[in-house]
Amino acid sequence: MSAATEVNAGRGARLGLAFAGVMLIAVNLRVSFVSVGPLLNDISTDLGLSSAGAGFLTGLPLIAFAVFSPVAPVFASRLGLDRALWASLLLLTAGIVLRSVPLTGLIWVGTGLIGVAIAFLNVLVPSLVKRDFPGRVSQVTGSYTAAQAAAAAFGAALVVPIAQVPQAGWRVALGIWAGLALIAVAALLPRLLRHGRQRQAPEQHRVPYLSPWRSVLGWQVTFFMGLQSVAFYVLMAWLPSIEQSQGVSEAAAGTHLSIFLLVSVGASLATGALLHRLPDQRLIALAGSVLALITYSGLAVAPGLTMVWVVTGAVGCGSLIVVALSLFSLRTVHHSQAAALSGMAQSVGYALGAAGPVAFGALRDWSGGWTLPLAVTAGSMVILCLTAVLSGRDRLIQDVRP
């Protein structure tokens, strides 16, 4: 074997291990969060939670996403990117375990830790992709986005049967996901031990970069991230209720939600495959935004065509999240700047994502129907279309070097 062949083989092996690491992190990004919803009635009954308390339990991770996302780049600059990711996975494991321990108050502590850990991982994974796969950002982003959606769909379907097993219950059903996090912790440890010191050095001497908080383009990407979060989280929170008001059974509405998640997996993979083939991201970003607009408009004017809007919404949302996460790398000049943009965009984005379902519900209560909240959300999707065009242009948040 020639020296060049050996070098290429070694590089391929390193990239393969790096990709496996990204995927192991990805499958942990949603499953511990979304698996609470199907068990919420059992948890509320067991702990005596009010409706407001149950709502706060499901919303606490989103609050943590909004509050702690800007902290993640600082965390990574202190520890180094690889160490920060590994420590976040350890924190996630601890949160999942504590959430399932039958001691008063630990469910809140554990849920909060889960939110902090996922906030850090959400922000830092795009930075990892920027560093290790600078020429394959969209493909890798599409793959890990699809993986996290597939794991979420699998987890949401599995937790109820597990909870119904004798001597199991909701604590076991939620606690088993610590095993998935531990697999990622163990798998990434050898790489951390081998490369942690080498990876730390660039963090200490990184080139200066323009803060995305001071960039118009940074804010365009941020609002795109936020509005696509609104599109997704409003559907996750309210689509089953909208369907049930049209006579769809609870079981069928749950099935439709699973179909939504599975279709979004395919949309994410397709977007990742297509995104790098175009000169910029405007066309795909706008197409996904238009599909989101059609979904909310369709639910308002033709609610009987539920499955049509489930599919259009899934394709739109599955595409939009890949574009949004890819922009963190594609609009920056350095992986530390990518982490800064990711922290900014996800902080504001998840704040909007958390506020969207609340505002939608308030409009529903005020108007007594679904038309007004759906129309207002459709209006926000028009703004999403505008931010898609602006943030999708082939530009960079410029480096501050002369």
Image (cartoon, helix red, strand yellow):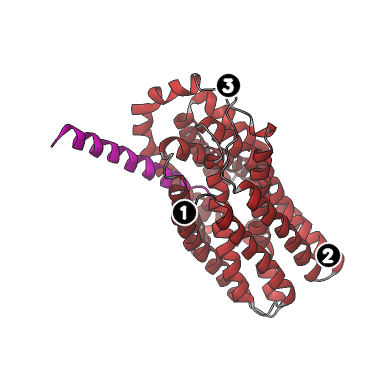
- Contact between marks 1 and 2 (CB within 8 A): the answer is no
Q: Is residue 260 left or right of residue 236?
A: left
Q: Is residue 337 left or right of residue 390?
A: left
Viewport quadrant of the C terminus: top right
User: Which residue range is magenta in the image?
Assistant: 1-30
Residue that extends furthest to the right in the rendered view of this protein: 366
User: Relative to 220, is 154 above or below?
Assistant: below
Q: Which residue is mark 3?
A: 402
How crowded pointer 1 is (Cα within 10 Å; few <14, some 14-19, many 20+) is rated as many
The dot on residue 272 is 1
- The Cα–Cα distance between marks 1 and 3, rounded to whole angstroms, is 34 Å
Amino acid on which the number 2 mark rests in the picture: Asp
Q: Is residue 70 visible?
A: yes
Tag in front: 3 or 2: 3
Q: Is residue 163 visible?
A: no
The dot on residue 365 is 2
- The Cα–Cα distance between marks 1 and 2, rounded to whole angstroms, is 39 Å
